[in-house]
Amino acid sequence: MIHDLTTIRNIGISAHIDSGKTTLTERILFYTGRIHAIHEVKGKDDVGATMDSMELERERGITIQSAATHTIWDGYHINIIDTPGHVDFTIEVERALRVLDGAVLVLCGVAGVQSQSMTVDRQMRRYKVPRMAFINKLDRSGANPVRVTEQLCEKLNHNAVLMQLPIGLEAKFEGVIDLVTMKAIYFEGDSGEHVVTNEIPEELRDEAEIARESMLDAVSMFSDELMEAILEETVTEELIHDAVRNGTLSMDLTPVFLGSAYKNKGVQKLLDAVKRYLPSPLDGENTGVDLSNDEAPLTLASDPNKPTVALAFKLEDGRYGQLTYVRVYQGELKKGATIINSRTKRKHKVGRLVRMHADSMEDIASSSAGDIVALFGIDCASGDTFTDESVQISMTSMHVPDPVISIAIKPVDNKTVDNMGKALGRFVREDPTFRSRVDPESNETVISGMGELHLEVYVERMKREYGCEVETGAPQVAYRETISQRSDFNYTHKKQTGGSGQFGRVGGRIEPMEDGGEDFEFVSEIKGASIPTEYIPAVEKGFVQCMAKGRLIGFPVIGIKVVVDDGKSHSVDSSEMAFQAAGRGAFREAYGRAKPIVPEPVMKLEVEGPVDHQGAILKTIMQRRGTVIGTTESSGMARTESEVPLSEMFGYATDLRSMTQGTAEFTMEFARYLPAPAEVQKELKEKFSSKIVDE
Amino acid sequence: MYRKFLNARSPLRLLEKGLHGGLGPGNLGIVVGGPGVGKASFLVGVALDELLRSGRVLHVSMAHPVSHIRDHYDTVFEDLAASAHLEDEALVHVDIDRNRSIRVYPKNELTPAKLREAVKVESEASGQPSMLLIEGLDFETTSREDLADFKALAGELAAEIWMSVSYSKEQIPELPASVERVEDLVSVALALEPGDDVVLLRALKDHDNPDLTELHVALDPKTLLLTRH
């Protein structure tokens, strides 16, 4: 167990795809002695980077699943949470960010700040994760760390300060100048494992002095002592380190480090910086909600002596069985102890507690607040909170968006149906934005998620990990139905066909929820007993049944308030069934008159490309019923933000590529539901009614 | 209330009256104010008025990111719609969004040539703007030639151009020096000054009219709406 919390660093390494994040992680594990040989990403030598334990990731050379790995640098415990880079997996990024105390933003020294970096950076800001930057790939032609640092300031609004200068660039990149110690640092040996400190080369001396001065200028804002010391010319390394740490922790400063992970340069100095500048679990504040006190928020203390609170942020079906990654926020997690899941109230015994390395593990007896560990054989969903039995606390529930796109899937080979079920069961547990259901009408299995790529990845994982190949249907957008005005109903359900009859009358109104809310509300304003109290839930049930499938285009109805204020019953013929039927009838009666409309999911689309191509970029957006919000121009690039209906976004990547000769890139995430225009609504309506006729 | 009543009742009509017909196409107008007094809100108010009257607005800024400007519009529009009980608010909102473009440039990087290029791209994609807003231009260091060129662009497009001009103090003199040197290029100059509980709008220059009248228009700092005063 780690007793001194100040020596723990829970960090994320976050970056644009292809910025070299995986290579950097791999090098960190190598220099900290966790792995003993270096492999290249993208399977150049067929082994792949250690962090990419999934075959699919290996093949694509990207990391999709976040895994936590523990390593030690200079006596400090560093837990690296590997965060996925693609926006289609946003929930994973956000969940990983939640458990981080700090992060390293990896930027490509050539491409600089790309649109993906902006998304990730925005998320980090939202979760208040202090960060520093590592400008990678300085060995590549066109690398320019000064420009990338400027982009950090301009595009991401960071107060980015170079803490190092490169010695040579591109093919001549040799090492870095440390502006704190004013020494040249070289990385020698076959794998750069020998860090050699030397005097700054004469020709770089002046440049380094100037850079140090501007660094001190920026950094002294965060320490009065340093400012005084500068005036009195008594600056010490310690004073600078303290000031940089202050600025980083308050998120007012982003120290920038340089290197080339691939060429084994700069990584050890980055680790030193992680140790010095990024927060320990004691520096941040974490809050949960008190379930025993109406979900009142409460602050958790990184104190091993308080009641245990831990968050399961990641599940993995590894080769050793089901693994649950948890972060302990308060108290201790001990082998053999009993913990309780705050959501399900189920008790679990902690059988095995392990510290995870990229692909191996170490058994431990206990783990305390601030640490990240993994549990074995605990059945839970990701996002669940565990406590000891003394408190009822849940970590604030994270916002989980509803899926916006679905596809039907069918196994190619019927023998693999079981495997498909297993795979889906696991994916659903691991990823709350991924859903699976069997459509009762078509009897097809339908999976839903946050984007095309999101679903594609799962289809591929099914094939690779479960040997189950599936055929996919056309993607289906998650439309909704709602009403745009109030409408009254007064419906009598009456049946007299021998035996006991059925009778029930309900009167009232349906109206849109205020402020465009998406919920359903049922209010009974029945006075007296015109409808006996015991039948009112049946009326509600009748409405709910109808809302599962709207009568306009056959999609779920949202955002409706039902008020029942009148009715009639019969002492013999009224029953629960009769009032359910009356509720259904009342809905049918009122719905058509309430001017139903079709909200459709609209995505926030950001496209970035050279200024010369912005005409073409705008065109791709306008063609897709998009609304342009605005364009930001800087250094020859234009970034256009817009909102585009999801239904228009299929095949966008290909189209954008051909319209801009591959120079533009885009990111997309769900924004909100907006009413579809009349012509789209009409088309959907026709499709729906022809389907009904077919049946 | 319907859109057309909202337009007729807008305090901007009062402003136009005070300015003998308003800024007018092809002209350059400026609003001068101290830091944080509400120059951006004035611009947004003027732009929303133009949008509600089915104009097209290009909002150029060197001061804020796109998302920030958009939020500003949304906030002011929602307040305006609520205060006027606007019918079909959602549809009007969609319409407004479609007719407004925002463009953001790094500090000191907007040149008349760049603006021309931007207007061209925007016009091809969605239509020619009838109003241009320029926010965050350093008026003091902008050359006379450039300002003349901005004005020429307003003429070519038959559009109004409004610019915000920062002043270091709360109280604005008759005409700040940075404006005086290019007075002939500026058709209308307004000052925004904090009053008791509202921010008051005062005419510094009204075309060639020697007598400046009271404008009776103010900016409510709580709702960011332009109001009668």
Image (cartoon, grey):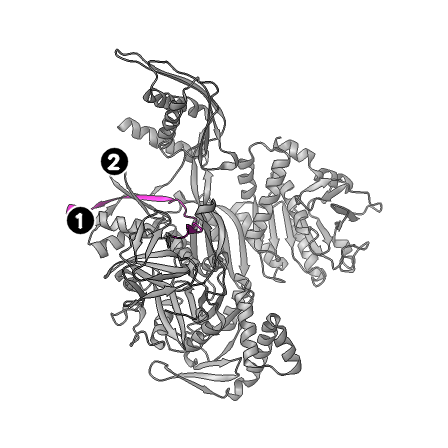
Residue A358 vertical position relative to residue A122 in the rendered view, above or below: below
Figure quadrant of the N terminus of chain A? bottom left
Marked residue nearer the N-terminal end (2 or 1): 1
Q: Are marks 2 and 1 in contact (CB under 8 Å)?
A: no
Residue B129: in magenta span: no
* Front residue (pair B70, A660): B70
Q: Residue A515 at x, y = what percent? A: 52, 37
Tell me where residue A330 appears, x and y as whole percent.
43, 60
In the image, taking residue A223 as reference, residue B180 lies left or right, namely right
Dot 2: chain letter? A
Q: Report the residue at 71% width, 39% height from top.
A: B11
Of residues A251 and A260, the one nearer the viewer is A251
Residue A484, x across and y down, in percent = 48, 30
Q: Residue A271: which numbered mark, if any?
A: none
**Hey, which residue is sitting farthest left in the picture?**
A415
Q: Which residue is mark 1?
A: A416
Q: Which residues are magenta?
A: A390-416
Q: Residues within 10 Å of mark 1 (few under 14, many from 20)?
A: some
Mark seen at residue A442: 2
Residue A219 appears in which quarter of the rendering?
bottom right
Circles 2 and 1 on the same subunit:
yes
Residue kind at label 1, given as amino acid type: Thr
Q: CA distance from mark 2 to mark 1?
A: 20 Å
